[in-house]
Amino acid sequence: MNKSELVDALAERAGVTKTDADAVLKALEDVVTSEVATKGGKITLTGFMTFERTYRGPRTGRNPQTGETINVAGANAMKLSAGSKLKAAAKASKKA
């Protein structure tokens, strides 16, 4: 499903226009980006999903082509965790 298909599905299920659904989706993107990526906060949608910024510390790696040891700098990363309801839905659809 791409973004336009998601907007169509949201509009249909919520009984709103596609323009309104697109605006809400855009607002969600903005809030998640602002809170998690910029401020380093955590957003939990209980039972559905958790968005969280984590830090990966510096480490030593290897260049796969040359085998040379390289230093990989630490960096911020995003962590998305599925909630219990989303996990249960995925598990149930796998059995069907």
Image: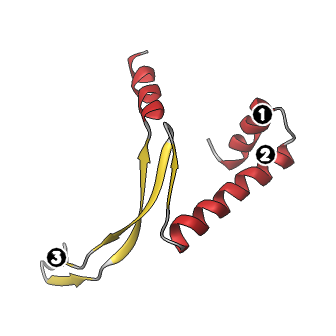
N-term-proximal mark, 1 vs 3: 1
Left or right of 62 on screen, residue 22:
right
Disc 1 versus disc 3: nearer the observer: 1
**15 above or below 68?**
above
The x, y position of residue 90, in whole percent, is 44, 29
Which label belongs to residue 72?
Answer: none
**84 above or below 22?**
above
Disc 2 versus disc 3: nearer the observer: 2
- Taking the spot 64% from the left edge, 59% from the top edge, the residue there is 29
Q: Amino acid at mark 3?
A: Arg
Q: Which residue is mark 3?
A: 62
The x, y position of residue 20, in whole percent, is 84, 47
The x, y position of residue 70, in whole percent, is 19, 84
Q: Amino acid at mark 1?
A: Ala
Instruction: Tell me how far mark 2 sits from mark 3, CA to CA.
Output: 46 Å
Q: Are marks 1 and 3 in contact (CB under 8 Å)?
A: no
N-term-proximal mark, 2 vs 3: 2
